[in-house]
Amino acid sequence: MAILVVGSVAFDSIETPAGRVENCLGGAATFFSLAASYFTPVRVIAVVGEDFTSEHESVMTKRGVDTTGLERANGKSFHWSGSYMENLNEAKTLNTELNVFGDFSPKIPASYADSEYLFLANIDPVLQENVRSQMSNVRMVCGDTMNYWITGHTDKLARVLKGLDALLINDTEAKMLAKNNNLVGAARAILAMGPKTLIVKHGEYGATAFFSDRSFGKGIEHVTLPFRAPALPLSEVVDPTGAGDSFAGGFFGYLASQPELTPLVFKTAMFYGGVMGSFAVERFGTERLQSLDRKEIDLRFALFRGLSHLE
Amino acid sequence: MAILVVGSVAFDSIETPAGRVENCLGGAATFFSLAASYFTPVRVIAVVGEDFTSEHESVMTKRGVDTTGLERANGKSFHWSGSYMENLNEAKTLNTELNVFGDFSPKIPASYADSEYLFLANIDPVLQENVRSQMSNVRMVCGDTMNYWITGHTDKLARVLKGLDALLINDTEAKMLAKNNNLVGAARAILAMGPKTLIVKHGEYGATAFFSDRSFGKGIEHVTLPFRAPALPLSEVVDPTGAGDSFAGGFFGYLASQPELTPLVFKTAMFYGGVMGSFAVERFGTERLQSLDRKEIDLRFALFRGLSHLE
């Protein structure tokens, strides 16, 4: 089933202990689309500037991503500069140039209207809500956000949270959103804000899903215990940029490829999220996500199983 | 099979967001002994002062711990004061009074000589090495250490590391010991220092074992992939003191109860380590570890499995 993703397509300049790159293709919607493309059809809505060439676009179209919703605007694309020199777990933003992204007003192409899954990547919650309200018939909506929206735009974000099947955020964001330093307490508070399920990403320690009694459809037993999927211990993280979006792409891509949302499907999807995140950080930008195949992905899935299972 | 543990028996004064206690029974050897006692016979070597009453001793003896090696010295017992008010993941030491522990010289009772498993809790590496050399016929030796010995007594610690089947330390200590900020790189470096296997404890994120080609005996296939055991997400951590020692007790206690060291036995032991750590933090001091039964422990083991397994 097709996933519609709305978010940023950007150029990134990044420095890490492994080196530096200038203006490589990035953005949450890009990482998400590429990661999800190995599991299910993906349709993207984003805005790019005149510096975005057909070669850039082909990175997505080669992976079968539908770019009908990629709007071209006059000016330059969104540009982000960041450094991981001090801490590989947290980017230090050096510069953000919104450029054409500053006036982004998502338009949904008619050919996207039958998308059954919707991913709201980290953008202004007003835009997330706008797209959400136009896609009221989807089977499942997942979303991401960040500290900027959590602290400065709480009311707008609250409306988005009410419409989410799953929210994917990191530890710091979860504790900030809930104003609670205990992860379990924070998870309970966030589930009370609307999301049926919360996934908290722990970087190199994996991710934990917290379920509510609304996580699964009728007839499926309620899951009370959280679920923790591991991350792969890596001897070198070349570039952490996009790891979280790649996790989301692997997770939601796998979910959308399955006929039914069961607890086991959800948990398996979290493993695929970790798998795609582990690939993403092996190279700068989207490089590693461009040239995978399903066999490599499933071999790594088996590694994740071996890493965590008593068998 | 009996485990001999050498380490501290102490009194702790602790403040956490859940409250405060004065002079409650603590010390690495105490937490380790109680946790391991649910799996296998335990024999303790430690020194205590005149303030250590028969009531304190009965905490251990009631759990079947052999206290023949508990030496009584003139003076006060080791006393530690710590606070977790700012950070539940890391104790802030307010005061350390070594007292009788300052002159600790471990003596091995004749009745302990046939112990097949040896745990060297966090004490001066000179004393660890001393005990190790007197117990040269044991089947397996595990050990702990801390930043104080890593940074200030590197050479002495190096000799201990050469004799260890498994070293159990936390992330910060592993990176400090290896002088490497990447966990996989640090693990490789530490395994090259001597320990056959390294377990890195991640607090609320569980623990990871890194294996070498010497981790298991001949005829057992070499394990190249690390193994990650989860921790239980808890809505309240009353007192983190002793969590790591309780992990070690559950881990090594289970290992010592098994006829053979296989990869599956090792991994299962890590789960039991997490289980005992999760109990320890539910109450102040050793309270929770005093009154468990194996059924409760195995129910929680099943929770850990459900938390992490695709089934």
Image: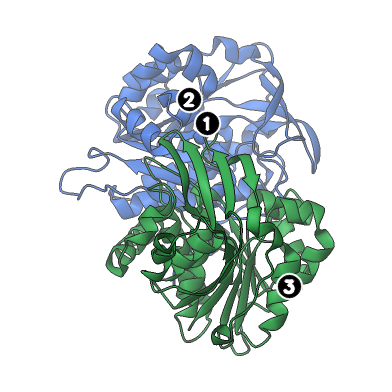
Chain colours: A blue, B green
The quarter of the rendered structure image containing the C terminus of chain A is: bottom left
> In the image, are marks 3 and 1 on the same chain?
no
Q: Are marks 2 and 3 in contact (CB under 8 Å)?
A: no
Residue depicted at x 29% and y 63%: B296
- Residue A172, which numbered label? 1
| Residue A166 appears anywhere in the view | no
Residue depicted at x 29% and y 36%: A139
Task: Report helix, strand or loop for mark 2.
Answer: helix
Which residue is identified by label 2?
A: A176
Q: Chain of mark 1?
A: A
Spot occupied by residue B233 in the image (x, y as percentages of width and height): 41, 46
Q: Are marks 1 and 2 in contact (CB under 8 Å)?
A: yes
Distance of label 1 from label 2 (alpha carbons): 6 Å
Q: Is residue A75 left or right of residue A171?
A: right
Which residue is identified by label 3?
A: B129
Spot occupied by residue A82 in the image (x, y as percentages of width and height): 72, 27
Q: Is residue A109 above or below residue A297?
A: above
Q: Nearer the viewer, residue A206 or B101?
A: B101
